[in-house]
Amino acid sequence: MKQLKNHQGGIVKVVNIRRRLNIVNKYYIKTGFYPFIKKTIIKGTIIILIIITILFLLDYFFIDTNALLDNLVHHYDTWIVMAIFYLSESFLGILLPDIFIAWCAKMDYPWLTLFGVATLSYLGGCTAYYIGKMIRKIPKINTYIENKVAKHVKKLHKWGGFFVMAGALLPIPFSIISMASGLIKYKFKYYSLWSLFRYPRFFIYAIIIFKIF
């Protein structure tokens, strides 16, 4: 009898989970989440192809890109390059992460260095999150920044953690999404979990970029 009740309880739980997933799926369809992801992936693929093409053309016609990266490795301490990257990831993501992935390819331990760079990107996002929280306390700056990141704030309200995940994985300005998360007081424990998708983003891109450099 007890086993039967447990079995029935298990079936009810599965049914409830399926219902919830169905409701969530319908919500994301209704709010345009899937077309947004599709559009972003296509745009991201095009951007990657453009960057690779530009690097190839620069390397072939103008400068030796590999020599330039080698020069960066030998003339600048690792901590300086990583500090610049961390600052970039903390403040609006000014520099493309792909440049630093290419830099990792030239290091003695490229994959270990890449892990360090991915971690700095993750920590930079967390820093941007808390910058967003602090900005809330300064009304004039808060209003200005909110206007600048309004579209990201709107998507965060609609999609929550899935939008943070999209920012971590796809070529969307992750630092800005992180700051927007702080602005709207999105719970940090959820933000920090969804942001872990930043790691596969770096390793997936590295598989392609390491082959080039």
Image (cartoon, rainbow, N blue to C red):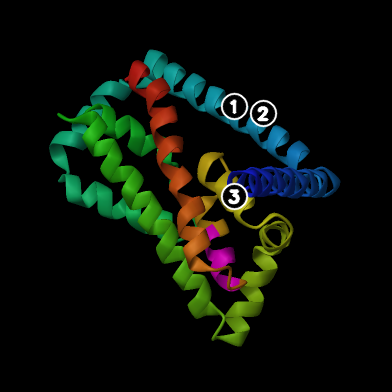
Which residue is outermost to the right? Answer: 30
Provide residue 195's location: percent of width, then percent of height.
Answer: 48, 52
Q: Is residue 24 left or right of residue 119?
A: right
Q: Are marks 3 and 2 in contact (CB under 8 Å)?
A: no
Cα separation, mark 3 vs mark 2, equals 53 Å
The residue carrying mark 3 is 2
Give the SS element for disc 1. Answer: helix
Sooner in the amino-acid sequence: mark 3 or mark 2: 3
Which secondary structure is most common in the magenta stretch? Answer: helix
Q: Are marks 1 and 2 in contact (CB under 8 Å)?
A: yes
Return the mark for residue 42: 2
The residue carrying mark 1 is 45
Question: What residue lies at 52% left-to-right and 71% top-to-bottom?
Answer: 132
> What's the magenta region?
178-183
Q: Tag 1: residue type?
A: Thr
Q: Is residue 73 left or right of residue 3?
A: left
Provide residue 178's location: percent of width, then percent of height.
Answer: 52, 60
Question: What residue lies at 59% left-to-right and 44% top-to-bottom?
Answer: 3
